[in-house]
Image (cartoon, rainbow, N blue to C red):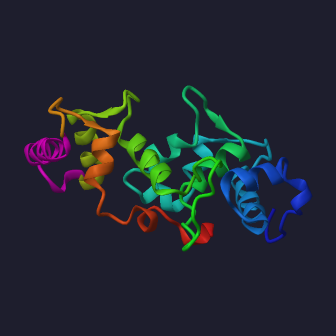
Amino acid sequence: MGCQSSHPSAIPELEEIMQETGFSQASVVRLYDRFQALDKQQKGYLSKYDLQGIGELAVNPLGDRIINAFFKEGEELTDFRSFIRVLAHFRPVEEGKSKETGRPEPMNSRLRKLQFAFQLYDQDSDGKISRDEMLQVLRLMVGIQVTEEQLACIAERTIQEADQDGDGAISFEEFATSVEKLNIEQRMSLRLLK
């Protein structure tokens, strides 16, 4: 697929995808070309192996978890529409654009970005980040630079600081509150997805 760009009519469900994700036609075409470049055998879907070839994910400590987010529970393949839905979480928020009433929450809203980030921690999908799940993420992020005992202390302290109801875990609401001051809209945005 080299340097040649796809024609918009080649993209199935283009209008619906644009409506759902908020991407412009030009962005959808660019992402479709990227999808096709990753789909080297032109199967019409990607496997986890195909996504592992993306350099930025290969060096990201949470790369495997991000890759897993492209796949529905128990599935090993993802089509273009599912692929672009995940990428929509990383679309920059457009300044001055308010949410239209009666429309679903945009995929790149603060709430949807937080939900996406939360699921990277909540690996068992029980709606809570346990001490063990926090520890797993910390291990991935800092590797061997910190002792296991230090990691355990950091995980315990993080849980204690965020856990408002005293159940020993972090709910989505507690997670959202604990990152309230972070500019999630900026930190979870990729300019190339504008």
For the record, the magenta segment spans 143-163
Position above or below: 105 against 121:
below
If the image is split into quadrants, where does the N terminus sit? bottom right
Magenta stretch secondary structure, dominant: helix
| Outermost front residue | 101
Is 117 or 136 nearer to us in this picture? 117
Residue 146 located left or right of residue 182: left
Residue 152 magenta-drawn? yes
If the image is split into quadrants, where does the C terminus sit? bottom right
Give how far across and how far down residue 191 sits, in percent: 56, 72
Q: Quadrant of residue 60?
A: bottom left
Give how far across and how far down residue 43 sits, in percent: 79, 41
Total numbered circles: 0
Q: In which quarter of the image is residue 6?
A: bottom right
Residue 99 located left or right of residue 162: right
Is 3 or 164 nearer to us in this picture? 164
Identify the residue at image location x=18%, y=29%. Answer: 167
Give how far across and how far down residue 109 sits, in percent: 52, 56
Residue 145 magenta-drawn? yes
Position above or below: 182 against 103:
below
Identify the residue at image location x=39%, y=50%. Answer: 62
Residue 33 located left or right of residue 134: right
Give how far across and how far down residue 188 sits, in percent: 45, 61
Is 123 or 128 nearer to us in this picture? 128
Is 40 or 192 nearer to us in this picture? 192
Identify the residue at image location x=49%, y=62%. Answer: 56
| Outermost right residue | 9
Identify the residue at image location x=73%, y=49%. Answer: 39
Q: Quadrant of residue 124?
A: top left
